[in-house]
Image (cartoon, rainbow, N blue to C red):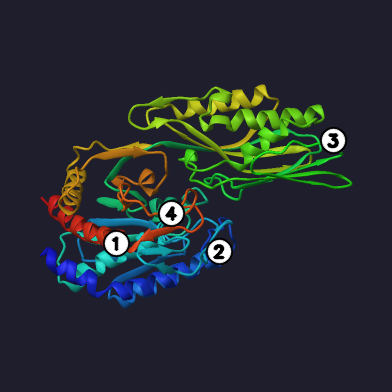
Amino acid sequence: MKRELIEQWIADHEEEFLADLGKLIGIRSVSQPGTAGAHPFGDPCAEVLDVALAMAEGYGLKTANQDYYYGEVTYGEGKESLGFAVHLDVVPEGEGWDHPPYSLTREGELLFGRGVEDDKGPALLAMYALRCLKELGYLPHHRMRVFLGCSEETGGMSDIVHLKEVGEEFRFVLVPDAEFPLCNGEKGILEAWLSIPCGRLQLSSGTVSNVLPDRAELFLPGIADDDFPEAEGITLSKGDTGLAVTATGITAHASRPADGIDALLRLANYAGQLSLPEEEKKAMAFLKQLIEGHDGSGIGIACEDEPSGALTLISGIVKTEEGRMLVNVNIRYPSTADGDGVADGLRTGVAAAGGQVDSLDNSPGYYIPAEDPAIAAVMEVYTEETGSPAGTYRMGGGTYARMLKNAAAFGPCFPDEDKGLPLGKGGCHQPDEAIPLSWMQKALMIYIRALCRLDACLSD
């Protein structure tokens, strides 16, 4: 297919693309796993899936709804399928937005809104890629297919689990939920809930496991100090029944804690300066030991490898119930590390502090050699379109690629290009999530051409 035809098609459909994206962004589709009834991830996720599938039908593509666990959009009749795995659920909006999170806002080249980068924008790119091939008359050897998931951010990717139970895997699948050029490996992800005695203190921090908290609140009953030290990011409220301490920070993805400022760690550091009862003091000291450095060294599980780098650890959620501190930890460990060994080390470290691991889920990483024919074919297109070397990389983020055979994360972000936003703004899982329209246009061209190249490469 001639490149100039694709380029013209993308330009002709820009306004329609933006209108469709606005419809998806307008739905607060935060997944609620375990919801009873016909909508396993809640009504908003069902609504956004209905809207997306109706769009695809309007493009003349075939659609299917798998009991609201996921949807599929297809073009072509091949026995095997190629395509994309994307998700329509989003993380909660959090605080600190200067733009409405659930309304698509355009300022110059920047598009703002929760999910515009992660992953509603890429989901629409995937559907438009199939639409372009259909409308330009491309006849594929494989069935072109888009998986539309509804519980990627929470719930252990149970939408993909459902696909593997009742559906069909891809011959090869791209996951546009990362950065270019191409991620051919992901770290393992270990999520656990810990509990430790904490006396009478009351603590609350975070909303989801995979986001560095930007706010943490601690109430200490009966604290009688009159002179409290000042500290950056800390506000105090002294009442008749105790002391309320609030820490603020900057959110970041769990795989990249250095991109933000951990409000929970600020709170733990501040609490270490207060005169606390022994049990409360030990609980806050353990919390600081656990998350300080975000590398697991405080509990003896730090490790790294050359392909994927160092282990990272954050606590995305903390709460207190009946005299115990309940701590969620989100660990990204190197792809060559032993996940069971990391889990055992976590249990040992928590037990040494008088606590326990209440639950633990371990998702191993993945790795595909750069020499794989499908990887090489996709990278050829990337180089042709950008003029940049077609290197691969590994990351700490977790995408659908780790759950599927023959999968790789691919775009849509261009890491060498700056969005021009301040620290803590504009990234996925951050306030004012944004992506330049030019990135979307370039990514769409790459995706369309990559599908054609894969179709030819894998039909030999």
Does residue 242 appear left or right of residue 135 in this picture? right
Q: Residues within 10 Å of mark 1 (few under 14, many from 20)?
A: few
Does 177 sit left or right of 98 as displayed? Answer: left
The first of marks 2 and 3 along the sequence is 2
Residue occupying the point 13% across, 63% down: 3
Distance between the alpha carbons at the discs numbered 2 and 3: 46 Å
Q: Nearer the viewer, mark 2 or mark 3?
A: 3
Q: CA distance from mark 4 to mark 1?
A: 16 Å
Does label 3 or label 1 sit earlier along the sequence? 3
Residue position for label 3: 225
Which one is in front in this view, the residue at disc 2 or the one at disc 1? 1
What SS does tag 4 mark?
Answer: loop
Of 75 and 353, nearer the camera is 353
In the displayed structure, would residue 61 be above or below residue 158? below
Which amino acid type is shown beneath numbered disc 3?
A: Asp
Q: Residue at x 35, y 64 (%)?
A: 109
Percent across and percent down for residue 387 are 17, 49
Image spot of residue 155 (x, y percent): 52, 51
Q: Tell whether 339 sits left or right of 279.
A: left
The residue where tag 4 is placed is 421
Earlier in the chain: of badge 4 and badge 2, it is 2
Residue beneath label 1, please? Answer: 438
Sequence-wise, the earlier of marks 4 and 1 is 4
The residue carrying mark 2 is 42
Residue sitting at 39 percent across and 51 percent down?
Answer: 164
Circle 4 crowding by C-alpha within 10 Å: few under 14, some 14–19, many from 20: few
Cα distance, mark 3 to mark 4? 41 Å
Q: Considering only vertical position in the picture, is 243 above or below 49?
A: above
Query: Helix, strand, or loop for circle 1?
Result: helix
Determine whether label 4 and label 2 are within 8 Å by CB: no
Q: Mark 2 is on which residue type?
A: Gly
